[in-house]
Image (cartoon, helix red, strand yellow):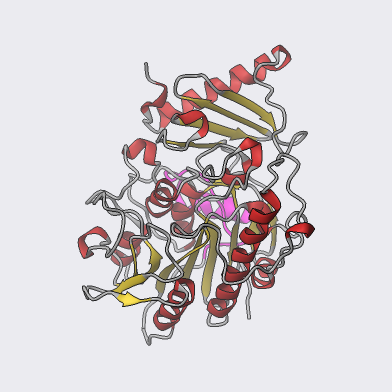
């Protein structure tokens, strides 16, 4: 069934010998070149919902089986807690704030173009959501998905994944994915995996649930949990929270079913598997309203799962801070491939603080653009105008119930985090703090 391995991280300009030593020092493993790679991205899955210690009564046996044979990164953060910005970071290894867009512009190197040029058979299945065309729905044009030899999916908005249509390859004929698009995505992924080939492959598979559907909200095929048995997180007081969380958990069930069907086709002796999410879901935490699902800096939507399993990877848990912008450079390291100079992320693991944010005021924290930093046990975030500024001790206050920014006793920490965020922005040419 499944097995696993793991690697190191430094900066992208370190020598390969240094990276190998770094990997060995952390995990006792070396990168294994020319293995197959499968990247699974789930939309709106919070890290807590994948943690057996926090998610009861939710049960995810297939994800648990993968995690048992892989390395679980318990402190992974999304580069931006919204779909397009994060997947742009994941696929390019660059910050959307530096690129100045949440869409993939022509000529930007991606996971697809880099691995395609390296001789991998590349495939992409499911939601895209990166085309520069602002229509945001329908067929993804070939020129907008350069580097992916096999493509089966759609733009991905709105999320009508219960009765949607997708496209395969360059065919302009829409194909029904009814009655359940995630299952159709799995079948397309299996079609790719079962293809005879004489070279390694890279396949990215995207599942929309537990993201709510655009037309009917949180509507799973069946409600598998009794709201009366749901205990919301301590930072959640909305009376509708148990019902919404029950639906959310039911959608998580459907993803786990697809994960099981997909991984049954995968040999972890020859395939590196990465499982992560674009962002999480507030689910009424921190006073969020019905439409406030993401785009805020809190753990519920910024802290995402990350499991890596495959050849030579050491099983266990890794508590180093990592970011989704680091996934591409880490895969390149594991494949012993050089990356383009544009890459800003770093190979795992690293003690570097995580820089994240959101570049739209729409339904955002405080109704503004914002930036944040997670460094050790501290999290800092500030809106563009400075009207909202937060400082949280994630060790002593994991549910972020108390904002310490106004407390004069924490002024030194606040000033240090503020200065670190400004310095980090400058280092990646993010103009957010420029006057």
In the image, what residue occupies the spot 72% across and 28% down? 402
372, 240: nearer the viewer: 240
In the image, what residue occupies the spot 69% across and 34% down? 400
Q: Position of residue 248 (x, y in %)?
A: 62, 59
Placement of 245 over or under 321, stated as above or below: below
Quarter of the figure with residue 409: top right
- 347 left or right, relative to 74: left
- 342 left or right, relative to 142: right
Placement of 201 over or under 226, stated as above or below: below
Residue 26 showing in the rendered view: no
Magenta stretch encompasses residue 414: no
Quarter of the figure with residue 234: top right
Which region of the structure is painted magenta?
6-31
Q: Position of residue 36 (x, y in %)?
A: 46, 73
Residue 244 showing in the rendered view: yes
In the image, what residue occupies the spot 42% across and 52% down? 87
The N terminus lies in which quarter of the figure? bottom right
Q: Position of residue 148 (x, y in %)?
A: 30, 67
Placement of 75 over or under 56, stated as above or below: above
356, 187: nearer the viewer: 187
Magenta stretch encompasses residue 13: yes
In the image, what residue occupies the spot 42% across and 70% down? 203
Q: Position of residue 200 (x, y in %)?
A: 40, 75
Placement of 392 over or under 409, stated as above or below: below
């Amino acid at each position: 069934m499944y097995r696993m391995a793991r690697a190191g991280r430094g900066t992208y300009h370190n020598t390969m010998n240094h990276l190998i030593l770094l990997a060995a020092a952390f995990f006792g493993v070396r990168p294994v070149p020319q293995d197959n790679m499968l990247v699974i991205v789930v939309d709106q899955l919070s890290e807590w919902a994948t943690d057996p210690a926090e998610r009861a009564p939710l049960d995810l046996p297939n994800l648990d089986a993968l995690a048992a044979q892989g390395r679980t990164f318990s402190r992974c953060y999304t580069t931006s807690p919204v779909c397009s910005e994060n997947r742009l970071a994941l696929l390019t290894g660059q910050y959307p704030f530096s690129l100045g867009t949440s869409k993939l512009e022509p000529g930007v190197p991606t996971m697809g173009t880099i691995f395609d040029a390296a001789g991998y058979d590349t495939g992409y299945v499911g939601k895209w959501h990166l085309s520069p065309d602002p229509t945001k729905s329908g067929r993804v044009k070939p020129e907008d998905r350069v580097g992916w030899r096999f493509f089966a999916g759609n733009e991905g908005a709105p999320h009508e994944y219960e009765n949607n249509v997708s496209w395969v390859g360059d065919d302009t004929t829409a194909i029904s994915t009814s009655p359940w698009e995630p299952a159709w995505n799995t079948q397309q992924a299996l079609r790719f995996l079962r293809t005879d080939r004489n070279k390694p492959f890279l396949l990215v598979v995207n599942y929309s649930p537990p993201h709510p559907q655009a037309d009917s909200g949180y509507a799973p095929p069946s409600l598998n949990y009794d709201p009366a048995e749901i205990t919301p997180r301590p930072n959640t007081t909305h009376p509708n929270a148990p019902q919404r969380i029950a639906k959310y958990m039911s959608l998580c069930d459907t993803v786990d079913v697809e994960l099981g069907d997909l991984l049954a086709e995968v040999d972890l002796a020859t395939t590196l598997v990465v499982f992560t999410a674009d962002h999480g879901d507030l689910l009424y935490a921190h006073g969020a309203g019905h439409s406030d699902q993401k785009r805020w800096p809190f753990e519920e939507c910024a802290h995402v799962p990350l499991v890596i399993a495959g050849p030579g990877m050491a099983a266990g848990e890794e508590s180093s801070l990592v970011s989704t912008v680091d996934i591409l450079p880490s895969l390149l390291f594991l494949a012993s491939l050089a990356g383009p100079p544009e890459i800003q992320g770093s190979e795992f693991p690293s003690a570097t603080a995580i820089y994240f944010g959101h570049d739209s005021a729409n339904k955002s924290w405080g109704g503004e653009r914002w930036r944040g930093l997670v460094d050790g046990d501290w999290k800092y975030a500030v809106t563009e105008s400075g009207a909202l500024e937060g400082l949280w001790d994630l060790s002593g206050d994991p549910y972020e119930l108390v904002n310490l920014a106004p407390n004069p006793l924490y002024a030194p920490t606040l000033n240090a985090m503020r200065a670190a965020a400004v310095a980090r922005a400058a280092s990646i040419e993010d103009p957010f703090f420029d006057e």
